[in-house]
Amino acid sequence: MNPFDLFNEWYEEAKASEPSDPNAMAVATATAEGRPSVRMVLFKDHGPDGWVFYTNTLSRKGEELAENDRAALCIHWKSSYKQVRIEGPVEQVTDAEADAYFASRERSKQLAASASLQSQELESRELFEAKVDELDKLYCDSDLPRPPHWTGYRVIPRCIEFWEGTQERMHHRRLFTDEGNGRWSETLLYP
Ligand SMILES: Cc1cc2nc3c(=O)[nH]c(=O)nc-3n(C[C@H](O)[C@H](O)[C@H](O)COP(=O)(O)O)c2cc1C
């Protein structure tokens, strides 16, 4: 089985059983010197081209990706006792893709994304709320434009590991490695 069909199978199962956000994943990035950091995001697209999440390019993760374009992802579906890990290089989505996704979001989310200087020090909660109100008034008669610092990142899979837990602790690990030209090899790993 190819890893993308297997992912889809597990994701469909998770969508039916996870109480919230079956598309949540941890994204690990690192500075050029290799100092790591990790946080949760939501993937909005997935498949052979990559796993896509949206964020602020000036955030900590954005700054780290600018200096080191590799990332590792970890998805844990607690309800089905499964984990998927993905590693690979990262690229930004096209402006057209980011524009289309931004336009599809609720206005409240567009306002928050536009007003947030994500990961920078915030003097007070009131300041952020005032910025949101200001933007809401400024664009009261029109759609909000996507801020230039808000876009998507696509993590292109080079290896994908599927971990399936069992009650007997004889967990099952399958590692798929990209061999180029759309071919993927599969090996088992000790749990
Ligand atoms: C379940 C969950 C989903 C999240 N989804 C996103 C997301 O899609 N994009 C995003 O920028 N932050 C998201 N966040 C917030 C991030 O975890 C993080 O706080 C933020 O992106 C700043 O991270 P950074 O300072 O490492 O760049 C999410 C948090 C949680 C708990």
Image (cartoon, grey):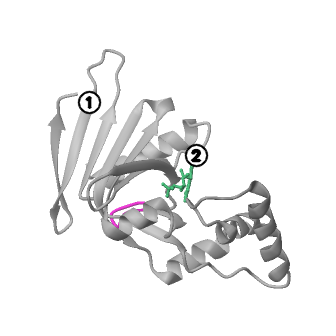
Q: Secondary structure at mark 1?
A: strand
Q: Earlier in the sequence, mark 1 or mark 2?
A: 2
Q: Are marks 1 and 2 in contact (CB under 8 Å)?
A: no
Q: Would residue 18 appear left or right of 133 to someone viewing this image?
A: left
Q: Position of residue 77 (x, y in %)?
A: 47, 37
148 shown above or below 132:
below
Q: What residue appears at the point 53 percent right and 54 percent down from the top-left corner?
A: 42
Q: Name the residue tied to disc 1.
A: 172
Residue 49 included in the magenta stretch of the image: yes
- Residue found at the very far front of the displayed protein: 123
Does ligand 1 reach within 8 Å of label 2's beta carbon?
yes
Q: Magenta part of the protein: which range?
A: 45-51
Cα distance between the residues tagged 1 and 2: 24 Å
- In percent of width and height, residue 149 lies at 54, 75
Residue 70, percent across and down? 29, 61
Look at 50% across and 40% down and name the residue there. 14
Number of other residues with Cα within 10 Å of mark 1, as a class: few under 14, some 14 to 19, many 20 or more? some
* Left or right: 67 as drawn, with respect to 16: left
Q: In the rendered image of this protein, does residue 97 appear above or below residue 82?
A: below
> What is the number of the mark on residue 108?
none
Determine which of the numbered discs, if any, sits on residue 21 in the image: 2
Could you tell me what secondary structure mostly forms the magenta stretch? loop
Q: What amino acid is at disc 1?
A: His
Residue 168: where, in percent of width, then height? 31, 14
Identify the secondary structure beneath mark 2.
loop
